[in-house]
Image (cartoon, rainbow, N blue to C red):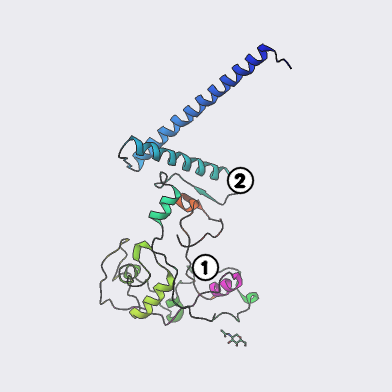
């Protein structure tokens, strides 16, 4: 079958001009993105060692901005993302450097038994807000609301699994508190947001005798526990939606914890 020559030319011209137009659009998209990257670098005082690193970081930045924008464009989302200080890091880098590096699955034996096992789910309140009820197990058992020292945990609970700013688990922290004979007050050992040397000899302001884990994968058990006392939770902060979280109520699925 013979194809008319002018049609071939027309198709060729069209293909050529279309791809030229696409290339031009790519280029202008890219130059807008380059400007955005420059502006972002200025905003976060980011300096790269050479043009090579800058080009690599630009590609990461571009991919992250596209991810953030397409996430935010989705309908029915309950939370949104922003181009923040982590926008030139891959998610692997973010996980490796900004999230819980110290996590190791605990080898210790968990206490067994669940103290609220016989509580009836039907008898639970529809909502409970421990902030308005005076949060804290110490308040519930003693009537006194005491702000306890996080920094004592950060600085002193470092001889087991927990590693201060590099992460830890609440079960290990509870174990430390029992062994330590309690925790001191926030005001006598204030939060420094950095690893520090353990100040020994702190006066204990409150202590615990034990702790329990809520049975796993059991929402009814979690409801029973939360209705009776505040419950500690651990969250995987390594997901891309955490990397760029900006506002709203995070919905997403529960991810895998070791990050
Ligand atoms: C729950 O009820 C069972 C059966 O009466 C009893 O054996 C168990 O000790 C109760 N658990 C708690 C935590 O009170």
Q: Position of residue 112 (x, y in %)?
A: 52, 81
Counting residues from the N terminus, which is met first, the one under dot 1 or under dot 2? 2
Q: Quadrant of ligand 1?
A: bottom right
Q: Quadrant of residue 216?
A: bottom right
Residue 19: mark: none
Q: Position of residue 135 (x, y in %)?
A: 46, 71
Q: Position of residue 95 (x, y in %)?
A: 43, 54
Q: Which residue is mark 1?
A: 129
Query: What is the count of numbered marks?
Result: 2
Task: Identify which residue is drawn at 38% across, 80% down.
Answer: 178
Q: Nearer the viewer, residue 196 or 246?
A: 196
**Stretch in magenta:** 203-227
Q: Determine the CA span between mark 1 and mark 2.
A: 30 Å
Residue 208 lies in the magenta-colored region: yes
Question: Which quadrant of the rendered structure holds the C terminus?
Answer: bottom left
Judge whether 44 appears above or below 119 on screen: above
Residue 171 lies in the magenta-colored region: no
Mark 2 residue crowding within 10 angstroms, few (<14) / some (14–19) / many (20+) = few
In this rendering, position of residue 104 left or right of residue 21: left
Judge whether 102 appears above or below 52 on screen: below
Residue 75: mark: 2
Q: Quadrant of residue 15?
A: top right
Question: Which quadrant of the rendered structure holds the N terminus?
Answer: top right
Q: Are marks 1 and 2 in contact (CB under 8 Å)?
A: no
Mark 1 residue crowding within 10 angstroms, few (<14) / some (14–19) / many (20+) = few
């Amino acid at each position: 079958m013979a194809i008319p020559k002018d049609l071939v030319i027309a198709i060729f011209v069209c293909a050529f001009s279309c791809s030229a137009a696409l290339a031009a659009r790519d280029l202008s998209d890219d130059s807008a993105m380059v400007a955005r990257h420059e502006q972002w670098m200025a905003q976060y005082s980011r300096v790269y060692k050479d043009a090579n690193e800058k080009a690599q970081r630009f590609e990461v930045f571009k991919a992250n901005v596209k991810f953030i924008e397409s996430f935010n464009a989705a309908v029915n989302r309950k939370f949104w993302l922003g181009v923040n200080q982590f926008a030139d890091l891959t998610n692997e880098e973010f996980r490796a450097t900004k999230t819980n590096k110290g996590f190791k699955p605990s080898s210790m034996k968990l206490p067994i038994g669940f103290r609220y096992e016989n509580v009836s789910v039907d008898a639970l309140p529809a909502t409970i807000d421990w902030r308005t009820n005076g949060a804290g197990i110490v308040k519930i058992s003693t009537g006194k609301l005491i702000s306890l020292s996080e920094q004592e945990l950060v600085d002193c609970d470092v001889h087991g699994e927990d590693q201060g700013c590099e992460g830890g688990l609440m079960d290990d922290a509870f174990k430390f508190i029992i062994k330590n004979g309690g925790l001191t007050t926030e005001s006598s050992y204030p939060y420094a947001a950095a690893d520090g040397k353990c100040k020994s000899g702190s006066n204990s302001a409150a202590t615990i005798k034990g702790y329990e884990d809520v049975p796993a994968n059991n929402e009814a058990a979690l409801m029973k526990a939360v209705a009776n006392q505040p419950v500690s939770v651990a969250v995987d902060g390594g997901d891309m939606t955490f990397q760029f979280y900006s506002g709203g109520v995070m919905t997403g699925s529960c991810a895998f914890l070791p990050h």
